Amino acid sequence: MSARASLPAVNRYSQAVWRRNALVWRRLIGPSLTTNVLDPLIFLFAFGYGLGAVIDRVGGMSYLAFVVPGMMCYAAMFAASFESTISTYARFSLQRTWDAILATPVSLTELMLGEMSWAATKGVFSASCVIVVGSLWGGVASPVGVLLALPALALGAICFACCGLAVTAQAKSWDIFAYFFTFWVTPMFMFSGTFFEVGRFPWFVQAIAWVLPMTHLIAVVRPLTAGVAVDPLAAAGHLLYVAALAAAAFSLARWRFGARLFG
């Protein structure tokens, strides 16, 4: 194992891992777009126009303006989570791509940073597709706010990617991902304020919702895209929580992968 393994730096080695995954993705861009982009766009259309026809305003804004930022965050979460679990596990366990990469000067930390950054990139790309479509449909009130929301979406995608890596590091079969999507991805989709305000749920559901990182991400992204005044301290607190969870999840994944690969 390389002496650089303890240095969590983004360098040319981790960038090479990112580029390798990007080149493979270019050859599989059709199925990838179908899974990671069309899925959130279908939900956006169904809820934005379906429920939007019967729900006038939510949280002081039109329902379409309310749901579009939620779908931005969902798109980032789903794409980053899928890439850092299903795709990463295939490279780690089935294709043995990790073994080949670790036989080069690339360290485990650099490999994981490359995987994480690639998953986060796919998350931001998927969220950007929702931004474009949502803007064309009139669901984005503040173009400037969208630009300000992009760094928050990138941080959220990093967090979701790190959480996915933490689960993949524990995986010994595909079965664990069924639990991951059922008990992690689905609750964020349903309870983090994507379609309804979190305050509408019972107190115990609200308590669970505020443990989930997507709730904090939506709390920052939604007012920005809607052009609503944002409390800087509250936004900083939300983003700090997301960043702390990302760091903890990455550290856990690094420790577990190290134990599995090197004893």
Image (spheres, helix red, strand yellow):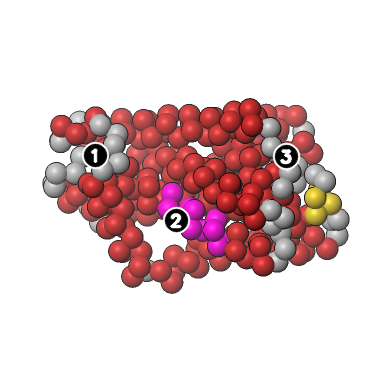
Q: Secondary structure at mark 3?
A: loop
Q: Choose top left, top right, bottom left or bottom right for residue 250.
A: top left
Give the residue type at disc 2. Answer: Lys
User: Do residues under tags 1 and 3 come within 8 Å of each other at their CB atoms?
Assistant: no
Give the residue type at disc 1. Answer: Leu
- State how far apart marks 2 and 3 are (Cα): 29 Å
Residue 155 locus on image (x, y percent): 49, 41
Residue 59 visible (yes or no): yes
Left or right, residue 16 beside residue 191: left
* Residue 134 in the image: above or below residue 186: below
Q: Nearer the viewer, residue 136 or 110?
A: 136
Dot placed on the residue nearer the N-terminal end, 2 or 1 = 1
- State how far apart marks 1 and 3 are (Cα): 42 Å
Q: Secondary structure at mark 2?
A: helix
Left or right, residue 8 beside residue 157: left
Residue 76 locus on image (x, y percent): 53, 51
Residue 194 visible (yes or no): no
Query: What residue sits 66% from the left and 62% below the top?
Result: 134
Q: Residues within 10 Å of mark 2 (few under 14, many from 20)?
A: many
Identify the residue position indicated by label 1 in the image: 108
Left or right, residue 179 beside residue 251: right
Identify the residue position indicated by label 2 in the image: 122
Q: Residues within 10 Å of mark 1 (few under 14, many from 20)?
A: many
Prevailing secondary structure of the magenta residues:
helix
The region drawn magenta spans 120-130
Identify the residue position indicated by label 3 in the image: 229
Give the residue type at disc 3. Answer: Ala
Q: Choose top left, top right, bottom left or bottom right for residue 49.
A: bottom right
Q: Secondary structure at mark 1?
A: helix
Dot placed on the residue nearer the N-terminal end, 2 or 3 = 2
